[in-house]
Amino acid sequence: MKEIVLNEKNETAVCLIAKVLQGYCETIYNIFERKHETAINILLGQMHSEILYDILIAHEVEVCRADKKYKGVPDINLDDLKQEIMYWHQEHIIALVLKNIKQDENEDPIYWKLKMTVNRH
């Protein structure tokens, strides 16, 4: 299990980071089911991943803005949010997704998950 420890006090930012990282992994897994090579190219290509993250961030920000319980969206610097997401992508997501999509076909699959812990300031 991979663990990400977020040192974040903004609940909305934590939610956005978690949903964007989860959405990225799910998107790569879905692409991999149809186009193995494309999924690997997106996962390992910095530019491709950044574009996918931009789309996921924009989508999740709109979802949060529409949901009345998330009031902190205007307070979030989206460039800083993306920078943090890209950091976790490099540190954990690439290795995690590769473990899940490049498994030995002769063994039962073992799916590795991402655990996110939040340290409140």
Image (cartoon, rainbow, N blue to C red):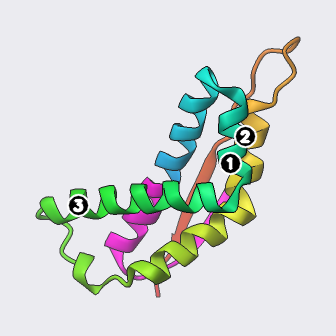
Badge 1 or badge 3: first in the primary sequence: 1
Please provide percent x and percent y for residue 50: 56, 62
Residue contact at pointers 1 and 3, CB within 8 angstroms: no
Image: magenta residue range: 1-20
Query: Can you identify the residue that label 3 sits on?
Result: 62
Badge 2 or badge 3: first in the primary sequence: 2
**For the residue marked with disc 3, what is the amino acid?**
Glu
Please provide percent x and percent y for residue 85: 55, 68
Residue 6 — which label? none
**For the residue marked with disc 2, what is the amino acid?**
Ile
Is 4 magenta? The answer is yes
SS at circle 3: helix
Q: Is residue 15 above or below residue 38?
A: below
Viewer can see residue 86: yes
Please provide percent x and percent y for residue 87: 65, 72
Query: Can you identify the residue that label 2 sits on?
Result: 40
Left or right, residue 120 beside residue 111: left
Q: Nearer the viewer, mark 2 or mark 3?
A: 2
Q: Is residue 77 above or below residue 102?
A: below
Residue contact at pointers 1 and 2, CB within 8 angstroms: yes
**For the residue marked with disc 1, what is the amino acid?**
Leu
Left or right, residue 105 beside residue 33: right
User: How many other residues sit within 10 Å of disc 2, few (<14), some (14-19) or many (≥20)?
Assistant: some
Query: Can you identify the residue that label 1 sits on?
Result: 43
Left or right, residue 12 beside residue 92: left
Residue located at (36% from left, 79% from top): 10
SS at circle 1: helix
Is 53 magenta? The answer is no
